[in-house]
Image: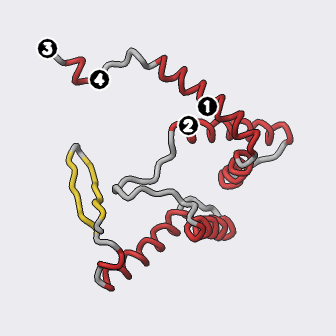
């Protein structure tokens, strides 16, 4: 069964019906498969500063793809974390960075991300951060509750 993939830019959306893998022509399957791998691994090491950082980033991405842990959306948009996930990561990053500073440890961006991931993997910490993140997001929503959308603002002009 085909899936619809949409791309939106400049307020215009285009759609494509992507055939199911087993219904696509072999060359189309090979192109999508290998291009997907190549692009995913290139994205993984784009910001690496050394060979070992590049290798680590690629291996991590490879492992996530193989294990099925990599999130993605088939609607043409990038895989996006929820506001709650982003806020939890932000709070964890603040805590991990502060702890590193207290210990006099300088963390690379990649190492910080790794430690944040490990920190969030601890169930009691994750629950604590989830509750704090929910409070933070509620406060942000309340602060912006009076924001008016352009269509509403200009209605009646």
Alpha carbon distance from label 2 to label 4: 23 Å
Instruction: Give percent across and percent down for residue 85.
Output: 57, 41
Residue 129 vertical position relative to residue 149 in the rendered view, above or below = below
Alpha carbon distance from label 1 to label 4: 25 Å
Circle 4 is placed at which residue position? 149
Identify which residue, 101 or 27, lies in the foreground. Answer: 27
Q: Nearer the viewer, mark 2 or mark 4?
A: 2
Alpha carbon distance from label 3 to label 2: 36 Å
Circle 2 is placed at which residue position? 84
Residue 37 placement, left or right of 124: left
Q: Nearer the viewer, mark 3 or mark 2?
A: 2
Circle 1 is placed at which residue position? 133
Alpha carbon distance from label 1 to label 3: 38 Å
Q: Nearer the viewer, mark 1 or mark 3?
A: 1
Alpha carbon distance from label 2 to label 1: 6 Å
Circle 3 is placed at which residue position? 156
Instruction: Give percent across and percent down for residue 111.
Output: 71, 54
Instruction: Give percent across and percent down for residue 44.
Output: 55, 63
């Amino acid at each position: 069964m085909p899936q619809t993939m949409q791309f939106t830019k400049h307020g215009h959306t285009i759609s494509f019906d992507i055939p199911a893998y087993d219904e696509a022509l072999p060359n189309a399957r090979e192109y999508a498969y290998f291009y997907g791998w190549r692009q995913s691994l290139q994205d993984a090491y784009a910001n690496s500063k050394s060979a070992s950082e590049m290798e680590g980033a690629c291996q991590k991405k490879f492992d996530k793809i193989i294990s099925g842990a990599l999130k993605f959306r088939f609607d043409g948009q990038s895989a996006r974390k929820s506001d709650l996930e982003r806020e939890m990561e932000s709070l964890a990053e603040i805590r991990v960075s502060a702890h590193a500073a207290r210990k006099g440890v300088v963390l690379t961006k990649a190492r910080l991300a790794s430690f944040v991931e490990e920190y969030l993997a601890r169930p009691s910490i994750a629950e604590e951060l989830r509750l704090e993140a929910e409070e933070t997001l509620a406060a942000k929503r309340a602060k912006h509750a009076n924001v008016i959308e352009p269509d509403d603002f200009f209605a009646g002009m």
